[in-house]
Image (cartoon, grey):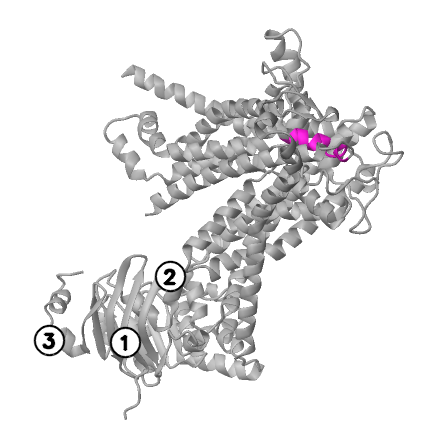
Amino acid sequence: MQIRIIKDKIISKLMLVFTLASVSVLLVIGIGLFYRSLPLLQKISFYHLISSSIWKPLKGLFGFFPFIMGTLWVTGIAIIIALPLSLLTAIYIVEYAPAKVRKVLSPFVNLLSGIPPVIFGVWGVLFIIPLIQDHIAPHFVEFSTGYSVLAGGVVLAVMIFPLIVSIISEVLRTIPKELKDASLSLGATQWETIKKVILRKAIPGIIAAVVLAISRAFGETIAVLMVCGNNAVVPHSVFEPGYPLPALIANNYGEMLSIPMYDSALMFAALLLFIIILLFNLISRLILANLERKLSA
Amino acid sequence: MKKRKFEEWCVKVFMVLATIIVTGSFFLIVGTVFYKGFHYMNWDMITKTPSGGFYIGKAGGILNAIIGSLYVAGGATILGLVISIPVALYINLYLKSKLIYANTLRLVFDVLFGIPSIVYGAFGFLIMVYFGIRASLLGGIIAVTLLVIPILVRTLDEVIRTVPNELRDATLSLGATRWEVAKVILRQVRPGIFTAILLSFGRAIGDVASVLFTAGFSDNVPTSLHEPAATLPLAIFFQLGSSVEEVQGRGYASALILTIIVLIITVLSEILIKRFSKHKIQ
Amino acid sequence: MTKAPHISVQNLNVHIGNQHILKDININIPDKKVTSIIGPSGCGKTTLLKTFNRLVDNTPDVNITGKVLVDNENIYDPNVEITEIRKKMGLLSQRPYPLPMSIYDNIAYGPRIHGTIGKQELDVLVEQQLKATGLWNEVKDRLHNSATKLSIGQQQRLCLARGLAVDPEIILGDESTSALDPISTAIIEDLFITLKEKYTIVLVTHILRQARRVSDYIIFVYMGQIIEFGPTEEILLNPKEELTKEYIKGYIS
């Protein structure tokens, strides 16, 4: 056999090894995090861990409820702000904007997605925090430092704009023009066509975009950490501080080694994030893949 | 009739407003960073390392973080490429006839792409503990490589998929092996590979959560893989927390520099993507 | 014993997913002749052509049974080295796909991977193949320019020259002129007629007039089956099967 054919065989085996190795990272992360959080899980029941509100690592009390609520608050606020704005923007870019405007607009969406999280955090501290503290909060509550779940939500919302806009635009673009023409030629206005025909077709795609955005928001660490206040109590209004899971991990990693069970607790937080995000990602990717297959068939 | 027209008009106004908010937020962010950071920018900032002690020292610049960031992002991108190019080729050339495997692999990389960097950071830390590596340049590179592999694989996969099957067939029918075909395809998609490199570098240089526990921090420029290394995002994060105005200023200047680097990278990759689609075989 | 034909297909069945694309194909392709495969689009003619050099392997979810003998060797035998089989067959696809390199390197690519590396040897080979395809005078001053700068017709001839450079025995053409202008088409067709002195040529075409102009034999494929096979004149003027008659009259398209 010729050398080049042997070479091809060896390279193909090597590629297979690389592929399997990089894919198995997913599995290894899951197993590794689970293994490291096992000590905690053996001591305290899973249900108790996620439902207790008492967080006193020094006394061995690990209640994750405030952190889970913190995560849910920020993510919820972010989606409520980002979804309508992104949806309207995507519709405008795809269906309304003249070609020239579209060409100018789309790069900015990409530029926004390129900005690193920490810069969003800096912006949050410099712009959003004073805005909330001085101009928004005084209308509703007596006092707020500005560091709040609202600030986290706003910063996150801006961070997930590009993600939602780009996925929804892509879905909108795949909807056949004939469908639109059919509705328009029945005398519907453009908005009626979008509302009754296009959006209906695009709903799975929009759901996928939202699910993906939620999982992105869940895992975002540094930007949220910088503006959220990081107080381990369950927030009761948007102007109160919160303490999302990723921020918990990031803030305490240095000191954890000296307190028993602490690292296990932080790994448990990471595991929680990992599982939720894994599931959400799987769901949205499967919806999107299904959409793609349907439209290409 | 009037009501319908009015609704159409209202919606349009909302759309334009939403678009202004979404695209405007970009200018707001970049504007804020420039406004605040410009004041603290000077020549020393990018040519000197900080002096006078971490967190309180007033003198010097952030050369340590600039170089550290370049090392981490560069190292991770190179290491990531070494792994991702074979993977992307394998999915597209060797698994071509087994669509279900190829698509499952794509799904896994999509999911890996969605895993937040804090989880990669925590996992990277576990690996380091396991192998007895201290927080260092090497540790940072390992964690960030894990983060960029999915980006690289996904981008390269998309790029390779734009190559028409016929080019592959033409090469195969000359009696080429799959590896020889792979080399032709890599040549064909060279601009696409640059795009992937830029995307990965951009993500790597801006990420905090993955280097937080793995790269450590240092006021000096690292001279070996085993020394801790400062990175720009961490320099921003740490220095903003200081109560000394000059140190905070270094944080703002770091933010400005990081923003500029990332903007340049994003613009370059945008241009490359446009170019790339222009030179495809029609 | 007469010499075995270059290509002999025996009981070939091809499934893609759950579709039965080719059904019980049995045929011997005549040596050193031009054979055209005709039939309506989607009938499986391109798939049939691609089974000859196993490019069909790369189709997702494909399943192949039966034999294709090339020089009496079953190319679907697991022990066969596929690159050697493909080297024996040049392929000319619908549109030209020059490799992303210079004109010279395009032609030298095949010989190089198969071990010819001497500069002089390659120079001779490149010139020879460019002359054989009538390109030499048009490109001899810009051999090291990118191949994508050539016109489509020139690119297609370059692809033919590239295929000839690995010294094949068989040329497969998959609607090789469908992207070309009439003049380039005529040049390519003339080339086929000249080349059949040395090569066995199999063409897929949906243009009956082209089949008549260039081929010695015609295979008519319909719904994945070979309906009729015979000399060009016979098939076109005096078909035996009802389906062939209808196709030639234009009832099926």
B63 vs A146, left or right, is: right
In which quadrant will I find the C terminus of chain B?
A: bottom left
- Numbered tag placed on residue C10 in the rendering: 1
Identify residue for label 3: C238
From the image, state whether disc 2 or disc 1 is nearer to you: 1
Q: Which residue is painted at 69% across and 32% down in the image?
A: A250
2 or 3: mark nearer the eye: 2
Residue in the foreground of this view, choosing between C129 and B131 = B131
Q: Amino acid at mark 2?
A: Thr
The residue most toward the front is A43
Label 1 crowd bin: few (<14), some (14–19), many (20+), radius 10 Å: some
Front in this rendered view, residue B164 or B227: B227
Confirm whether circles 1 and 3 share one chain: yes
Residue B42 percent coordinates (x, y): 80, 35
State the quadrant of the N terminus of chain B. Answer: top left
| Region in magenta | A246-257
Mark 2 nearby-residue class (10 Å; few <14, some 14–19, many ≥20): some
Find numbered disc 2 in the image and state the secondary structure of the residue it sits on: loop
Q: Amino acid at mark 3?
A: Asn
Image coords of residue A123 (percent x, y):
66, 26
Mark number for residue C59? Answer: 2
Q: Earlier in the sequence, mark 1 or mark 3?
A: 1
